[in-house]
Image: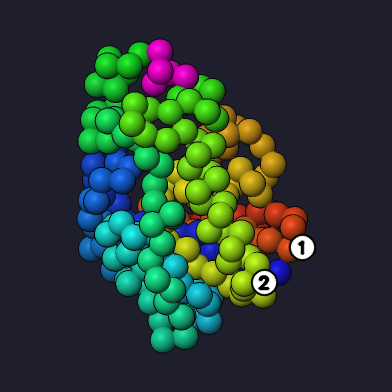
Amino acid sequence: MTVWHWVRHGPTHEKTFVGWRDVPADLSDTAQIARLHDHLPKTALLISSDLIRAHATADAIAHPDRRRLPSEPDLRELHFGVWDGMRFSDVAARDPDLSRAYWETPGDVAPPDGESWNQAAARVNAVVDRLNNTQPEAHIIAVAHIGVILTQVQRALGVTAHQTLSHTIDNLSVTQLLHDAGQWSAVHINHCP
């Protein structure tokens, strides 16, 4: 069984869409980071998105017994295209029908020059499937982004993307998912140590 410990990166304090834009995380809450560090398994593989907010968060929870894997570009946040860096209200004004469809009927709807939910999920699934195959008995700590984590919550729960979007994934929270012989299950979602 592969045990996934999905960690959402530290907060960015951005009030706009943040997808592939490389924005740093605020890692000043050392007490919360220490609790997160202590909650996670000491012996595990540690991987992160290549975006600085995830990569730096992974550095903050590193442990000598956690083997760091190279940062993974395919664990980046959803690609919001031209919406990246825009306020939600500005996106709704610019693309009212498209932005509404993106949230209400996620799947194949994509922002201009961005990717759809299904495209992002396929990208993330490929990384996860590869690690499930090569590390079938490992604990894997994966530091990533809300959209990335939600794609895997969808897999574990077997629900629609729209249903998945009702879940909250807080910064520095842990979502633990299990993969065993092709079957997924969720131990906890959005646990804040």
Looking at numbered disc 2 in the image, what kind of residue is underneath it? Answer: Pro
Question: x, y (%) of residue 182?
Answer: 74, 58
- First in residue order: circle 1 vs circle 2: 2
Q: Is residue 60 above or below residue 172?
A: below
Q: Residues within 10 Å of mark 1 (few under 14, many from 20)?
A: few
From mark 1 to mark 2, how far is it between C-alphas?
9 Å
The numbered mark at residue 136 is: 2
Is disc 1 in contact with disc 2, using a CB cutoff of under 8 Å?
A: no
Quarter-of-image position of residue 105: top right
Residue that numbered label 1 is attached to? 181
Residue 96 seen from this side = yes
Residue 39 seen from this side = no
Looking at numbered disc 1 in the image, what kind of residue is underneath it? Answer: Ala
Q: Residue at x 54, y 69 (%)?
A: 140
**Mark 2: secondary structure:** loop
Magenta-highlighted stretch: main secondary structure?
A: helix
